[in-house]
Image (spheres, coloured by chain):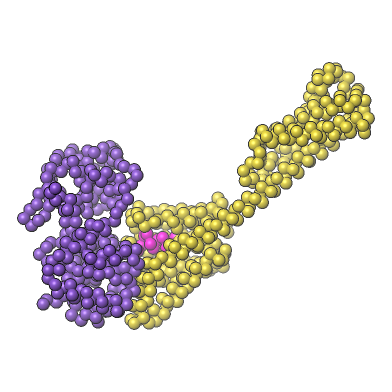
Chain colours: A yellow, B purple
Amino acid sequence: MIYPTPAGPRYSRLRRFTLDIAITQVFNLIIAILITYVVRRHGGFFVNLVISMCIGTLATAFIDGGRLIMWGEQKPPKWKFVLLIIVSLPAAQFLGKALAAIMLGIPVEDMSEMRGGNATAMLIGAAVCSMFIIWFFWSREHIEYLRAEAEAEKARAASIEKQALQAQLQMLQAQIEPHMLFNTLANLKGLIDVDPPLAQRMLDQLIHYLRATLCASRSQITTLEQEFSLLESYLGLMKVRMGQRLSYTLELPDHLRHLSVPPMLLQPLVENAIKHGLEPRVEGGMITVRAERNGTRLTLTVCDTGLGLDNAPPSTGTGVGVSNVRERLQALYGTGAEFSLNPNTPSGVIAELAIPL
Amino acid sequence: MNMIRALIAEDEPILAHTLLQTLQRLWPDLQVCGVVENGIAAVQEALAQRPDVLFLDIKMPGKTGLDAAQELAEDWTEDVPFPLVVFVTAYDEYALQAFEQAAADYVLKPATEARLSKTVERLKARLSQHTERNAELERIVGQLRSLMPHVPASSERLGIIRAAVGNQIRMIPVAEVIYFEATDKYVNVVTAESESLIRTSLKELIPQLDPDTFWQVHRGTVVNVNCIQAALRDESGKLTLKLHGRPESLAVSRVFAHLFKQM
């Protein structure tokens, strides 16, 4: 298993390698002392130190260097790493001994004799030492990964929170825009005389819309049912205002009603469809909002027959809602979510987002 | 005195209905000759009906109330006085106080009955002064000129225009363009030898042109001043431009006529 890349490498590869080699020297020193004064082989401390340094440094160079070259700062795949160790240790043992022999000016054949001749014991000792050193490096690495991961997680949470706040702000600035509010109030004022029951209903919808929009960011999660009922209120208001020019359909299958979704993902898309597609179009048009389950994904579609992507009046600030939806999907699901805007035929836009269930 | 006639342009049916009813209550003598629900119909109906008063919602589909007013001012023939315009809007993003001189009035939605009756008083007073009425057109033209959306000049000046003609892209240096003419969804780029359509609007094109070289002379025409040979005024006061390199002449609307006063 490969761990996620920690946020920003702490060391460059070369610096890291140098540091590991330096730490290895400390272990080499300890091993030399142990061999000289505890195991009591002949040859003296200096000779043992040179041998231990040659073998130890080469082992680190092979294992650690190989790892950094092949996998960089990433956590290496376990079995490949074990294979690297199995190959590197005997190689380091053999080459290190040869190197030490050359440096000390002793023939290689004399080396094993000098170190006591018990090859099996030597090999086991070397293996134990190596394992200890490998374990040391491995756990140090592991701790660092855990820390980096925790940091990345914290940053991710912070960015989600930031975007939720931003969404709330934009909601307040853009969605309860004065035009929407005052026009709705003007309609209400007119309806009170002419059609009091409709005025009542419109007022209920306005209250629901305001409450949902103003409170949405306080809850991190909502159900599809709640989202659709908010859309119903918003589209109901717009229907009273636009009259014959607007028709709409909301399609939410029963089995998806209680599904949890982040709030305010659909609404910016619906408001965009109205604001840039249908409201500025002389003939008005139709809007369809649909929720569907496709295997393990939830697909939400907002489809309108308005002016379309190319023909919307330019200076009306298109893109705020869309970029906000994109950013939030990215923060919440990473690459697990998809979002697309496509032209509808014969006119209008199809906005589609898919999120994992 | 003849019946005073009014046209209402408002895209939201309930608001149109409410305005109509309130006006009938406050001003029983007023004859509302039509209610239209978009900017295009507003211009058509106003030119056809020649009302005395025009209630124009600003945010309408098809064309904004401001664009409709400008188009009317350009196309209005002076045998009938220009209507008194009352702008209606839900939100005063256009700083409508600036219109007070030109428009007869402006009203914020939802309007109280008291506010509307003030508007009615104002309209009545203005309609009774004939000299004032004849100056209405000039006043609104002046005001529209200063209020015309002041598009900030784009930092990127257009040097070459790429126009698709058949299956080739024609490269047209901007300096060779004699005039640009807006058609339905396109702009016609006219040089001495050629005419080519590009898919853009004049509104998007103008900020990318050098304002000293290219002058807007009509809502649908931008002309290269170096190619203007003369400006001619006919008996009715209409201005047309004669061009170097093109046989046709271009109409100058009254909104832009001030550009051709003698020095």
**Residue A246, position in %: x, y?**
36, 67
**Residue A101, position in %: x, y?**
83, 20
Q: Is residue B129 above or below residue A264?
A: below
Q: For this view, does A79 lie left or right of residue B176?
A: right
Q: Residue at x 18, y 80 (%)?
A: B29
Q: Residue furthest front?
A: B263
Which corner quadrant holds the C terminus of chain A?
bottom right
Q: Quadrant of residue A268?
A: bottom left
Q: Residue at x 72, y 35 (%)?
A: A19
Q: For this view, does B239 lie left or right of residue A279?
A: left
**Residue A318, position in %: x, y?**
40, 56
Q: Is residue A224 visible?
A: no
Q: Is residue A113 visible?
A: yes
Which corner quadrant holds the N terminus of chain A?
top right
Q: Residue furthest left?
A: B235
Instruction: Please give the count of numbered marks on the rendered protein.
Output: 0
Q: Residue at x 90, y 24 (%)?
A: A43
Q: Quadrant of residue B83?
A: bottom left
**Residue A33, position in %: x, y?**
88, 32
Looking at this view, is A17 or A254 the one in front? A17
Q: Is residue A258 magenta?
A: no
Q: Which residues are magenta?
A: A269-279
Q: Residue at x 77, y 30 (%)?
A: A57
Q: Tell me which secondary structure the magenta stretch mostly adopts.
A: helix
Q: Quadrant of residue B108?
A: bottom left
Q: Is residue A271 magenta?
A: yes
